[in-house]
């Protein structure tokens, strides 16, 4: 596993990377309160996560909804977001990840940056730092080529070296996680239950670039009623 520190100002990947927010959970351990609708600083939690993605550099944002999706649409202000319904949200986060990646098919996105709605301590600075690592990696492997043979060779290189980047906290992998597009099919196939991309990332640990974000974000989850004290 490779650990690489990058500057948040070393480059911004705009247009190429879609922000993918997983916000479908029903909050079972919170007494059935959907996490997207939890109040933080006077607004639904889903709005804060979308702002983090946008401020961090993601121009396109897809939001996967599930539990009380109609209420989220009615109460949250999510302008210019692509809202993706996951009818199988009760099966766990894996189903939301699959739905979100499927929604990116046919777009211009070459990578997806995945963030979870229940981690309000992770903001725009962590998103920007992961995007900077992506921009640096893309600069080392440019996609523009002069002829068809070079294009074919470049595609072969891309399939091997397509970015797989994760924020880390004291060296431990966390969110957000960025998947280059050639990883999407494999991630979707491995995403089951509440595991999300965990199995895929473990299998591809040697290809994963870790970007330390512990100095700019806190990777706690809002999972239990006790955790609600972390919300403002």
Image (spheres, rainbow, N blue to C red):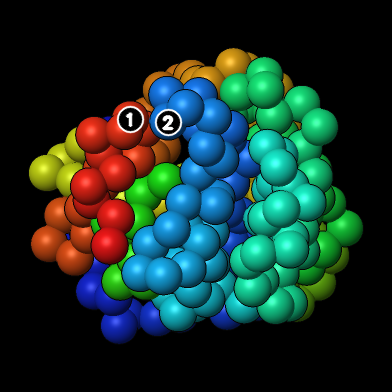
The residue at which mark 1 appears reads as: 224
Name the residue at 58% across, 46% down. Answer: 23
Name the residue at 67% across, 19% down. Answer: 91
Q: Earlier in the sequence, mark 2 or mark 1?
A: 2
Near-viewer residue (135 or 144): 135
**Does 77 sit left or right of 227 as displayed?**
right
User: Is residue 131 in view?
Assistant: no
Q: Locate residue 185, reporting x and y percent.
A: 72, 33
Tell me if label 2 and label 1 are in contact, CB under 8 Å. yes
- Element on which disc 1 rests: loop
Near-viewer residue (24 or 155): 24
**Does 129 sit left or right of 79 as displayed?**
left
- Is the residue 104 above or below the residue 197 in the image? below
Name the residue at 58% across, 35% down. Answer: 25
- Is the residue 217 above or below the residue 115 in the image? below
- Is the residue 46 above or below the residue 78 in the image? above
Q: Label 1 neighbourhood size at 10 Å, few (<14), some (14-19), many (20+)?
A: few
The residue at which mark 2 appears reads as: 30
């Amino acid at each position: 596993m490779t650990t690489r520190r990058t500057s948040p100002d070393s480059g911004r990947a705009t247009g190429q990377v879609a922000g993918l927010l997983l916000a479908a959970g029903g909050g079972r351990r919170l007494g059935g309160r959907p996490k997207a609708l939890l109040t933080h600083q006077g607004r639904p939690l889903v709005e804060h996560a979308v702002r983090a993605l946008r401020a961090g550099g993601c121009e396109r944002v897809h939001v996967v909804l599930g539990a009380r999706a109609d209420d989220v649409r009615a109460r949250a202000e999510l302008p210019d977001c692509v809202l993706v319904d996951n009818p199988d949200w009760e099966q766990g986060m894996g189903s939301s990840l699959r739905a979100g990646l499927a929604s990116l098919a046919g777009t211009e996105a070459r990578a997806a940056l995945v963030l979870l709605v229940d981690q309000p301590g992770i903001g725009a600075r962590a998103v920007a730092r992961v995007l900077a690592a992506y921009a640096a990696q893309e600069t080392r492997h440019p996609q523009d080529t002069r002829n068809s043979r070079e294009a074919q060779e470049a595609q072969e290189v891309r399939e091997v070296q397509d970015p797989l980047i994760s924020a880390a906290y004291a060296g431990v992998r966390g969110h957000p996680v960025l998947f280059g597009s050639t990883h999407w099919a494999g991630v979707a196939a491995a995403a089951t239950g509440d595991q999300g991309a965990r199995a895929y990332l473990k299998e591809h640990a040697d290809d994963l670039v870790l970007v330390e974000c512990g100095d700019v974000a806190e990777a706690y989850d809002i999972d239990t009623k006790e955790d609600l004290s972390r919300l403002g």
